[in-house]
Image: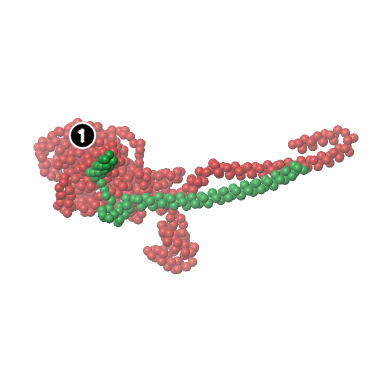
Amino acid sequence: MKKYIFLILFFTFGIFLISSIKNETRDIEKNIRNINAKIFTLYAELHEAGLDYDYLSSPTSLSILSENFFKDGHGLNFYSPRQFSYINLEAINNSNNQKAELTK
Amino acid sequence: MNFFKKKNNNTQKNKKSFYYDDYSHANNIKTKNNNSIEISKNRMAFIFFVILSIAAILSIKILYLSFFEKESFSNIYNKKNFLPNRIDIVDRNGEILARSVNAWAAGISPKLIKDEKKLLINLKIIFPNLNLKKLEEKIAKGKFFYISRRLNNLERDKLWLLAKKAVIIERKQIRIYPHNYLFSHVIGQIDEDNFGISGIEKSYDLKLKEKNDKNKNLKLSLDSNLQFLIRNELFNGINTFSARGSAALLMDVTNGEVLSLVSLPDFNLMERKDISDTELMNKITLSVYELGSVFKTFTIAAALEKGIVNPDTEFQNLEKKIKCRDKWISEHDELPKNLNVEQILVRSSNIGAIKIVRKIGSENYSNFLQSLGLLGKINFDIPEVGTPLPFEWENCALETASYGHGIATTPLQLARAYAIIGNGGYAIEPTLIKNNNFQFQNRIISQTTSEKINKMLSKVVKQKEGTANLANISGYDVGGKTGTSKKINNGEYTQKKLNTFVSLFPIKNPKYLLLVLMDEPKPAPNLVYSYNGTKISNIRRNDSGWNSAYIAGRIIEKIGPILATNNLNSF
């Protein structure tokens, strides 16, 4: 008799177990689908945002923006090697001055 | 199985003796009952086995999804949902030059139209530029057609709100070129059916349609920043010299990678409709020109390579003009009577070049030009490539070819030939595709000849007598050669000029080649420029490659810092 009770209990447990596992699986799959949809939307947005970024940071766009917003109205500045050496000299002089100040 | 065994045992017992019949009968009933319980137990066991199997399968599926398919459910699966029908085209720094994105398209299915007039009025309100007559004609044909292939969100919403069955709105992928004009002659376009019809889009059509790897892209050797700076300077040049057009090519002579290719006028890739406009031809790759004195470099290189002359070999008492068959050939300027080979190149002497080429001979000279790839069609990464005009070495052709007249080729081939001379004499093929594994293989000319020519080209720019002083940009060690030719119309030379300058820098060990071409430049007397600390104005020249050298100088000044910082070893 014990065996039968055990079997019935086991049978009932099995039915509930299957049902709960099935529900869990369905929920998980549903979640996966929802997350997938969100990821897809985000991926598509990222895909287009990447394009927007490259458009806005393109040299042509930057040049137009610089002409519109830089106060001096000269747009983008381009440096010659002479200006590079000037910058380097300035940097060296600055660091030397700082050193001198620190040693005082 | 036990059940069957026991059943057999009972049967055997029954067969033993009839004395046991009564007992056996009672026993049989008992056994029967036992048997039916056994059967039920087995059935239940079987059902449990099935239930457990299903549970196990589902559990395994959960575990599988959780652990093993993690990756596919997070990334790749989603990317599969958005499959660009063409992969991206990017520049050497990874900046996007072409990308496919989702968009909306609207079409009309005439069979589903209920009230045509009402529909047409509604469409006219949404699309004010719509040609109603054409639309009516299309509707009359009864076949589905598109009214707009690129709807913006507002137009799409308005069409949705019409709620007309006949208006069909569908998702469609479109190709976006974020740089609009900048790479028009290189990237090309695709048609409505996603087939490349020009440029890289055509020649790499199959590769661009590959869908195996979503992260893949086609990396070009071009640089957006350099392209922008060069295009800007060319535009300035066109305005300054009222030129019809211009073009430039920047190439790495150590591997053939093209960093910039501009041809003006150009077109907006997002708007262009007519692809057969001859004004919009690619001047670097497709147009075939007589390029003038830039060919003198090849004449002298051929003579040096054959050991016929040295840079110091002097030609004395050079005539002011030479008669070749029935034509008179003269110098473009007054030059000294005695010139050595180096000065022939520096001062761009036509007569000197003729004297040298006569020593070389037509067969040797032809073979040399052939080895530099100037006479045959070049293999390049875009389909818009011109074929040099067939050249016959007769009737004074050798003499005129020595200074670049009568012989026509594409500027791209000219650039390749100069790159071979500049890089130490090795063969290279210009390419638009980033190639990190290039190695020199075939030698075309000797290292010695290359070094000698580079030294001479340096003097063309640096010496006062040189024709390209305006390209002498401090810090970049430029060398090069100018060239001017008269354009041909209906088989006759006109006064319209084509101005070319090919430069190599840093000339001691060339890394870059810049070719600048000005189409029909005119004198610019109002131009004021600074040269060697003095301001010069009222220049009425448009010959000897003067204009192109001036533009090339300005370009090198702008792009130099980018190139120098990217290649500290060379500069």
Q: Position of residue B402 (x, y in %)?
A: 19, 40
Q: Colour of chain B?
A: red
Of the pair B142 and B454, the residue shown nearer to us = B454
Relative to residue A85, is residue B35 drawn left or right?
Answer: right
Q: Position of residue B91 (x, y in %)?
A: 35, 45
Task: Report in which chain the residue with disc 1 lies.
Answer: B
Q: How many numbered tags mark residues here? A: 1
Q: Position of residue B456 (x, y in %)?
A: 19, 37
Q: Kindly identify the residue that appears in the image at 24 percent across and 39 percent down.
A: B506
Q: Colour of chain A?
A: green
Residue extending farthest to the front is A104
Relative to residue B553, is residue B57 drawn left or right?
Answer: right
Residue extending farthest to the top is B307
Q: Does residue B414 lie above or below B100 as drawn?
A: above
Relative to residue A17, is residue B492 drawn left or right?
Answer: left
Quadrant holding the N terminus of chain B: top right
Image quadrant where residue B353 sits: top left
Amino acid found under the numbered disc labelled 1: Lys
Q: Kindly identify the residue that appears in the image at 86 percent across and 37 percent down.
A: B24
Name the secondary structure under disc 1: helix
Q: Kindly identify the residue that appears in the image at 67 percent across and 47 percent down.
A: A15
Image quadrant where residue B433 sits: top left
Q: Kindly identify the residue that appears in the image at 20 percent across and 51 percent down.
A: B521
Quadrant holding the C terminus of chain B: top left
Q: Does residue B316 lie above or below A41 as drawn?
A: above
Q: Is residue B431 visible?
A: yes
Of the pair B97 and B290, the residue shown nearer to us = B97
Q: Which residue is mark 1?
A: B452
Q: Position of residue B541 (x, y in %)?
A: 16, 49
Q: Is residue B286 visible?
A: no
Q: Does residue B353 lie above or below B130 as drawn?
A: above
